Image (cartoon, rainbow, N blue to C red):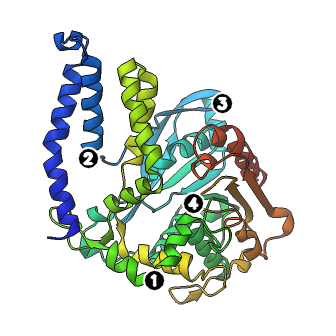
């Protein structure tokens, strides 16, 4: 029996316990239940909910972006599928209104493509990013598909395929009017895609905003970079790559399973997660429902992970973190050499978090050294003080400090 099959067996074994714990939590906490009046009922309910949340299966969260404040007005938002590929859906979050003045304002907003990471978590991790951008922009986003849900008959998906997807999405939306924002991992394939398009003489986006990504992972290496360089590529292939079992549509596909990625996330800082769960239990006992709900929302997203195609994952380890082919000028995508210097008509902004422990200082800013064809006045770099990796695209710092500068940068090149 394979590790993936053992995991599925354990998940199936835990399911009844998780469901029972959920039922117990409700029985001992519901105001209409006589059991909620028993001595110690709060602790019993809290303990059972904690067991439920540890043992339950976390599915992909919904985007749940239904309205936004745009130009001083509240407008409904509808999620549309603009383009469907086997491994990714290109989504459009379209703002609707019947007010003629508002329609005119929305129509003139810049068009933005947010390229979400394919690195464990679902694209919904960028919910706050997308929701904030919708204030002043027409927004598209890449919504990557869990590899275990893609039939093996669809073939492999490599890093080269990722680059080709980005190119196709840019052409589909229209490069002449587009601004691209890449968050974390996709900074590398996005820079490659735009470089290749520029070298061929194709139209390129008006601007690129690159946030917390490993353009040159040799700079200020983090623990994430260290793991990739300490072990040969064969170690990753033999230790983290597994085959999708029945009954998933992707049965037989080789993947880096989400459950192993999640274990790695937890292992990076186990004490913080332990204390977070203890605080959650304490909040439930005390009746602090607001903090408890914040915990639920965070871990509903954090614990939902997807399987990554093996070819793509191994390509990324080798190309980005072991051989550093992009900054060394040696990366070929489907036989074409990636030359960032070919980009001339696209403005470039890089954003890094001062305390980022995933993409170290200078890794994203390295894009400026590669894009020598872009005139100096059209380069911009921002280091966000006090921000970690997630703080540059989600939360208060993103909304109050980073977004206004991203908005103004895009507006400058939107004419």
Provide the residue designation for mark 3.
101
Tell me the number on the disc at residue 57: 2
- Quarter of the rendering occupied by the N terminus: bottom left
Position of 270 with respect to 44 (left or right) is right
Q: Are marks 3 and 4 in contact (CB under 8 Å)?
A: no
Distance, label 3 to label 4, CA atoms, is: 44 Å
Q: Callout 4: helix, strand or loop? A: loop
Q: Is 170 rendered above or below residue 286?
A: below
Q: Callout 3: helix, strand or loop? A: helix
Q: Are marks 1 and 2 in contact (CB under 8 Å)?
A: no
Q: Are marks 1 and 4 in contact (CB under 8 Å)?
A: no
Position of 408 with respect to 263 (left or right) is right
Q: Earlier in the sequence, mark 1 or mark 4?
A: 1
Q: Position of residue 249 (x, y in %)?
A: 21, 64
Label 3 or label 1, whichever lies nearer to me, is: 1
Label 3 or label 4, whichever lies nearer to me, is: 4
Residue for point 55% across, 45% down: 130
Tell me the number on the disc at residue 232: 1
Q: Nearer the viewer, residue 408 or 188?
A: 188
Label 1 or label 2, whichever lies nearer to me, is: 1
Q: Are marks 3 and 1 in contact (CB under 8 Å)?
A: no
Q: Earlier in the sequence, mark 3 or mark 4?
A: 3
Provide the residue designation for mark 4.
358
């Amino acid at each position: 029996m394979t590790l993936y099959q053992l995991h599925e067996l354990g998940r199936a074994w835990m399911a009844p316990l998780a469901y029972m714990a959920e039922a117990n939590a409700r029985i001992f906490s519901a105001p209409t239940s006589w059991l909620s009046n028993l001595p110690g009922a709060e602790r019993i309910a809290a303990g059972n909910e904690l067991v439920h949340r540890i043992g339950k299966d976390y599915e992909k969260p919904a985007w749940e972006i239904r309205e936004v404040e745009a130009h001083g007005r509240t407008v409904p938002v509808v999620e549309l599928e603009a383009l469907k590929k086997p491994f990714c859906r290109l989504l459009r979050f379209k703002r609707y209104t019947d007010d003629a003045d508002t329609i005119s304002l929305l129509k003139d907003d810049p068009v933005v493509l947010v390229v979400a990471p394919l690195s464990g978590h679902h694209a919904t991790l960028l919910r706050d990013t997308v929701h904030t951008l919708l204030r002043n922009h027409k927004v598209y986003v890449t919504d990557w598909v869990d590899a275990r849900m893609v039939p093996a008959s669809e073939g492999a998906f490599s890093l080269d395929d990722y680059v080709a997807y980005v190119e196709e999405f840019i052409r589909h939306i229209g490069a002449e009017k587009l601004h691209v924002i890449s968050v974390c991992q996709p900074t590398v394939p996005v820079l490659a895609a735009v470089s290749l398009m520029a070298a061929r003489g194709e139209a390129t986006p008006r601007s690129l905003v690159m946030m917390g990504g490993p353009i040159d992972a040799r700079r200020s290496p983090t623990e994430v970079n260290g793991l990739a360089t300490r072990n040969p590529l064969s170690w990753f292939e033999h230790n983290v790559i597994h085959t999708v079992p029945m009954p998933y549509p992707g049965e037989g596909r080789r993947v880096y399973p989400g459950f192993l990625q999640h274990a790695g996330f937890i292992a990076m800082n186990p004490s913080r997660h332990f204390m977070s769960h203890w605080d959650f239990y304490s909040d439930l006992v005390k009746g602090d429902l607001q903090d408890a709900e914040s915990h639920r929302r965070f871990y509903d997203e954090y614990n939902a992970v997807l399987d990554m195609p093996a070819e793509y994952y191994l390509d990324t380890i080798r190309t980005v973190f072991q051989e550093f082919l992009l900054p060394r000028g040696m990366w070929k995508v489907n036989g074409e050499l990636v030359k960032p210097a070919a980009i001339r008509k696209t403005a470039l902004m890089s954003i890094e978090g001062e305390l980022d422990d995933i993409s170290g200082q200078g890794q994203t800013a390295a894009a400026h050294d590669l894009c020598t064809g872009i005139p100096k006045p059209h380069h911009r770099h921002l280091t966000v003080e006090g921000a970690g990796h997630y703080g540059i695209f989600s939360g208060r710092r993103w909304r109050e400090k980073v977004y206004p500068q991203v908005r103004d940068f895009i507006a400058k090149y939107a004419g």
